[in-house]
Image (spheres, grey):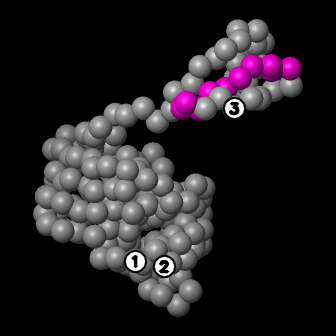
């Protein structure tokens, strides 16, 4: 997954220290403590908040667009179970709730190590499955997890132009797209 970025200006996050570690923010009157990490994209990692479904949908988008994050941020809500295990819910920047996020799990593991909550290897439980994350001694983060098919499609017609290869719904495309067992006419 690469090396984590901890410099606030590079994440980017507005804070006064050399790292955004244990910083505070407020959203609709509720205070949160967070650690910010970039894994090529910004992450706001919040520990100990076992939010209800309603609160997850309420605070996720508010924190994503919080003024402390000039380019918005992904938001991870973490429950630490032990030094080798934690659960994560993610509000992904620009997408909302997602089932899994590899960069988010990596950022959460780095943030948890920096806050002395876990060891450098941890299983992260996500709604989409478990990931094993290791922040190794070479400063790289390694992720291990299952690979599964998310979609399978079949092109029934090969008369596309170069523009239509990039976007099959372009004017003039006259094929069928398939989704699982059903066929969806274009």
Magenta residues span 172-181
Q: Nearer the viewer, mark 1 or mark 3?
A: 3
**Rounded to the nearest whole Å, what is the CA distance between mark 3 and mark 2?**
37 Å
Q: Where does the image place residue 6, in percent across and percent down from the top left? A: 36, 57
**Rounded to the nearest whole Å, what is the CA distance between mark 1 and mark 3?**
38 Å
Residue 73 drawn in magenta: no
Compared across the picture, whether 61 is left or right of 4 comes to right
13, 155: nearer the viewer = 155
* Numbered tag placed on residue 55 in the rendering: 2
Q: Residue at x 64, y 17 (%)?
A: 155
Residue 173 drawn in magenta: yes
Q: State the quadrant of the C terminus.
A: top right
Mark 3 or 2, nearer chain start: 2
Q: Where does the image place residue 45, in percent across and percent down from the top left? A: 38, 66
Q: Where does the image place residue 169, in percent across and percent down from the top left? A: 77, 29
Q: Which residue is mark 3?
A: 184
128, 122: nearer the viewer = 128
User: Neighbour class for label 3 at 10 Å: few (<14), some, many (≥20)?
Assistant: few
Q: Residue at x 31, y 72 (%)?
A: 47
* Numbered tag placed on residue 51 in the rendering: 1
Q: Main secondary structure of the magenta part?
A: loop
Compared across the picture, whether 155 is left or right of 75 comes to right
**Rounded to the nearest whole Å, what is the CA distance between mark 1 and mark 2?**
6 Å
Secondary structure, mark 3, is strand
* Numbered tag placed on residue 176 in the rendering: none
Compared across the picture, whether 170 is left or right of 122 comes to right
Compared across the picture, whether 27 is left or right of 85 comes to right
């Amino acid at each position: 997954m690469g090396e984590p970025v901890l410099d606030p200006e590079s994440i980017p996050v507005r804070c006064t220290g050399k790292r955004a570690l244990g910083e505070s923010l407020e959203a609709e009157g509720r205070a949160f403590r967070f650690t910010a990490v970039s894994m090529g994209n910004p992450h706001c990692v919040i520990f100990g908040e076992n939010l209800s479904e309603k609160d997850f949908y309420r605070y996720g988008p508010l924190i994503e667009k919080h003024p402390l994050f000039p380019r918005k941020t992904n938001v991870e809500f973490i429950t630490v179970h032990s030094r080798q295990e934690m659960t994560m819910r993610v509000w992904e920047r620009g997408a909302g709730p997602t089932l899994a996020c590899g960069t988010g799990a990596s950022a959460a593991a780095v943030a948890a190590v920096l806050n002395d909550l876990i060891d450098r290897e941890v299983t992260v439980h996500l709604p989409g499955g478990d990931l094993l994350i290791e922040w190794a001694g070479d400063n790289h983060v390694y992720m291990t997890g299952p690979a599964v098919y998310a979609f399978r499609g079949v092109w029934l017609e090969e008369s596309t132009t170069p523009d239509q290869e990039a976007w099959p719904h372009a004017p003039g495309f006259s094929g069928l797209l398939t989704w699982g067992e059903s066929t969806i006419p274009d």
